[in-house]
Image (cartoon, rainbow, N blue to C red):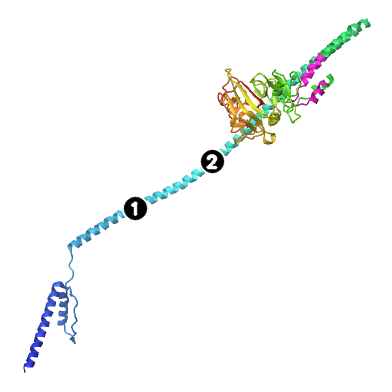
Amino acid sequence: MEIPVTRALVLLLFFAGAFFVKALKEASNADTSKGDASHKRPSRASENKPSRCSYTFIVPQQKLTGALCVSTETARVNRSEMVSLRALLDRQQEQLDTMRGQLEKEGALANEMRVLRRESVSMNARITQLYAQLLNEIIQKKDHALEQRRLESLVLNATSQVLQVSSSYRDLEKKYDTLTSLVSNQSQLITHLEKQCQLKNPAKTLQEATPLPVQRTSSLLSENTETKEVASNVQRDQSVHLHQEQSQQSPQELLETFDDPPSPPTDTPFISYPVTKSPGPWHDCHHVLESGEKSSGIYLLRPRNTNRLLQAWCDQSRAQGGWTVIQRRQDGSVNFFRTWDQYKQGFGNLDGEYWLGLEHLYWLTSQAKYKLRVAMEDWQGRQVFAEYDSFQVEAESDWYRLRLGSYQGSAGDSLSWHNNKAFTTLDRDKDAYSGNCAHYQKGGWWYHMCAHSNLNGVWYRGGHYRSRYQDGVYWTEFHGGSYALKKVAMMIKPA
């Protein structure tokens, strides 16, 4: 009897403890979450509803490992969160407005860019059109410049031809005067002989007429001698045999010679004169000085290793003498704007202005080592010189290239810039300039780009000159390129 009672007490205590634990859990769940109450109310209401069947399940108790919190109430609205959300919404609205403004600005910029691009395309088309017009004008100006150069060259050639014709005319005038004098003398002689023949006494006529032909013969011989001197205007490189043939010509042959037309300046570049004293020939003027001829004048020369004869002026008074003058300017009587062939053979008057000739310079400077001396004088009487310890001219195959040594003197060095340069004339352009330097400098020279010296240019009177180009006889280191010198002489001598 005691045992069942004990068991009943134990069971009662067990259920009471379980109920107490369950109550504690429900209290804790009620404090943490109030949502379950709202959830339970509908369940209670649903429990009040009549149902067909109801079941009760006994689930074994599970072991709980942590706290269980169930909210039985709906979440309440928090004001602070609402304020923050509204502030956030306002900021986003402001950002949206800002982005709309930027978008509008960028749209305006894009429109401006489109307009600028269209304007740029039109501007490029205009620039292309202007460039084409400018290029067309440049081509036209270049064509005009070429045409102007061609006309200038034609004018220069015409001027050169006029000078040649005038020179030939002067020679013909001299020959005409000589022939007129000869014909007049012969007419007087014939008239006098006719008068003597009409005399009654033949013996007296013969006695009186005999000395007259003798006297007239001597006068004719003197006239023939003068005629022979006039007819001896030949090139400097004529041979001795040619001189002998001319000396043996009869008066009739001389008259026939006068009837022939004159040769062009290239064929007869020099007006020759009787050779001074001994006939020579010598190798150069230094050889003349060593032979005892100490007076300056015209001498017959023949360089070594060649049969070429030439005449040149020998200056025996300056710098111990022995100088062969290869070029001289003093009064502007000779035109130095010549062609290649004329500069090759030489031209001018041996006792005045002349150019010895490039071919003669080549043969002279090939036989020994020569030095060059350039003597200059301005219009105030000041005299200076430039001397180079070596001077040589190459053959025509190398365009008579200049080989020059070191400088000394009082005029300044204006020729070394032309060293190793080929010779250039109007019809042979061998300079380094895009155009023809001889065309602008009005002469022949060893031009580079173009000149620091131009001793074969135009002889201007008075010093300073005005010209479109620097084409005077100038030496840059002595008075500059716009000052024309009064006198210039280039001479060579064995070093």
Kindly identify the amino acid type of the residue bearing the numbered disc 1. Glu
Between discs 1 and 2, the one toward the N terminus: 1
Question: In this view of the protein, which residue sits in the foreground, 474 or 286?
Answer: 286
Residue at 54% over, 41% down: 133
Look at the image and say whether residue 360 sits in the magenta stretch.
no
Residue 284 visible in rendering:
yes
Specify whether 167 is left or right of 249. left
Residue at 42% over, 48% down: 115
Q: Is the magenta stretch mostly helix, strand or loop?
A: helix
Which quarter of the picture shows residue 415? top right
Mark 1 → mark 2, Cα distance in angstroms:
43 Å
The numbered mark at residue 133 is 2
Look at the image and say whether residue 247 sits in the magenta stretch.
yes
Element class at badge 1: helix
Q: In which quarter of the image is the C terminus?
A: top right
Residue 349 visible in rendering:
no
Other residues around mark 1 within 10 Å, as few (<14) / some (14–19) / many (≥20): few
Specify whether 249 is left or right of 137. right
- Image: magenta residue range: 221-248
Residue at 67% over, 36% down: 398
Question: In this view of the protein, which residue sits in the foreground, 1 or 50?
Answer: 1
| Residue 347 location (% of width, % of height) | 70, 25
Other residues around mark 2 within 10 Å, as few (<14) / some (14–19) / many (≥20): few
Question: In this view of the protein, which residue sits in the foreground, 468 or 209?
Answer: 209
State whether residue 349 is above or below residue 435.
Answer: above
| Residue 107 location (% of width, % of height) | 36, 52
Which quarter of the picture shows residue 198? top right
| Residue 431 location (% of width, % of height) | 62, 34
Q: In which quarter of the image is the N terminus?
A: bottom left
| Residue 204 location (% of width, % of height) | 92, 5
Residue at numbered disc 1? 104
Kindly identify the amino acid type of the residue bearing the numbered disc 2. Gln
